[in-house]
């Protein structure tokens, strides 16, 4: 498994207009319903509305374990984790959108209205011609400086590679300039650097030109020039989709903030 399937799965989850949500009913049997995600944070968290008087919430109060499944064409993303019921006004206000009045006629102040936050613990992915199963805590363990997933790298065993982080940036193919830069700045990974390629508004972002290279103007402007060529400009060994390892670095950074808050 590499960062590519993570980026693809995150994109599918963000673009799906509906998802299947599974809980455990009163008899200990699975109960599945369709929900409309209001927000997704990659494959890590899913937010949707629910009625406090409904069976979904009653069952979650008894057992917070749950599952979410996104399906698009032949792609399938199954997430298993736990759900929290959020009833504070600020959260409900932030997620409120006009069409919810069909279910909660009193608006964001409707006493039956609440937000469910599902948080993944493990994932099973089938995206394109790739499949992967893993624990979220393993995915969010920093494994490299640039965002590659060394834990699941096919070269690790075949080339006797100790891994990027373990070898301090000198894996089987030699010293890595991205790792050297990161170590020199005192960072544990590129996600901590202000020059990590950011969200791009360029219409050429992630578009592939006639020579197989990725065209982009915006991302390059925010990059130090070391990670960018590997992630966006290498048609043979780079990311597909472009920027996949950048998204992984960003997830590691966000996970670090969440752990610090706790």
Image (cartoon, grey):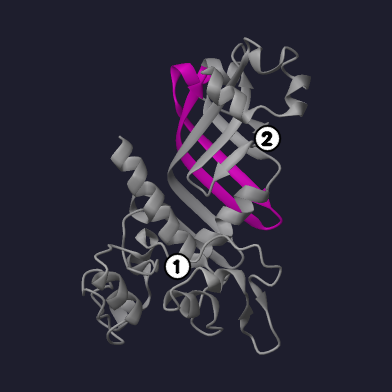
Left of 105 or right of it: where is 67? left
Query: In front: 194, or 252?
Result: 194
Boundaries of the magenta span = 59-87
Residue denoted by label 1: 2
Quarter of the image where the C terminus is located: top left
Residue 232 showing in the rendered view: yes
Q: Position of residue 116 (x, y in %)?
A: 54, 27
Is tag 1's residue or tag 2's residue first in the polypeptide sequence? 1
Quarter residue 53 falls in: top right
> Which residue is located at x 54 percent, y 81 percent?
233
Identify which residue, 204 or 65, lies in the foreground.
204
Q: Residue at x 62, y 9 (%)?
A: 111
User: Would you place residue 117 above or below residue 110 in this image?
Assistant: below
**Marker disc for residue 77:** none
Q: Give the residue at x 63% y 26%.
A: 49
Q: Is residue 109 above or below residue 3?
A: above
Q: Residue furthest bottom?
A: 211
Eyeballing the image, is 130 above or below 78? below
Image quadrant for the N terminus? bottom left
How many angstroms separate mark 1 from mark 2 (CA)?
29 Å
Can residue 27 be seen at all in this image of the molecule? no
Name the foreground residue: 88 vs 151.
Answer: 88
Count of marks placed on residues: 2
The residue at which mark 2 appears reads as 36
Residue 66 in the image: state x and y as whole percent.
49, 32
89 in the magenta segment:
no
Residue 130 in the image, given as x and y percentages of width and height: 54, 66
């Amino acid at each position: 498994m590499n960062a590519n399937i993570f980026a693809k799965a995150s994109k599918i989850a963000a673009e799906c207009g509906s998802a299947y949500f599974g809980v455990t009913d009163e008899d200990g049997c699975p109960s599945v319903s369709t929900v409309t995600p209001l927000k997704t944070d990659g494959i890590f968290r899913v937010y949707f509305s629910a009625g406090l008087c409904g069976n979904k919430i009653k069952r979650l109060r008894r057992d917070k374990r749950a599952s979410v499944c996104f399906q698009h064409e032949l792609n399938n993303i199954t997430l298993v984790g736990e759900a929290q019921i959020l009833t504070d006004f600020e959260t409900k206000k932030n997620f409120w959108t006009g069409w919810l009045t069909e279910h909660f006629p009193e608006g964001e102040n409707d006493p039956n209205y609440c937000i469910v936050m599902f948080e993944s613990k493990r994932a099973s992915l089938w995206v394109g011609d790739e499949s992967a199963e893993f624990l979220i805590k393993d995915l969010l363990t920093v494994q490299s400086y640039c965002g590659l997933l060394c834990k699941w790298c096919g070269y690790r065993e075949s080339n006797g590679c100790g891994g990027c982080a373990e070898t301090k940036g000198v894996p089987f193919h030699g010293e890595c300039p991205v790792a050297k830069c990161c170590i020199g700045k005192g960072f544990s990974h590129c996600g901590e650097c202000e020059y990590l390629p950011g969200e791009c508004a360029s219409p050429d972002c992630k578009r592939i030109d006639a020579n197989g290279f990725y065209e982009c103007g915006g991302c390059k402007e925010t990059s130090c020039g070391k990670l960018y060529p590997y992630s966006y400009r290498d048609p043979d060994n780079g990311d597909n989709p472009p920027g996949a390892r950048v998204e992984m670095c960003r997830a590691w950074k966000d996970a670090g903030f969440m752990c610090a808050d706790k």
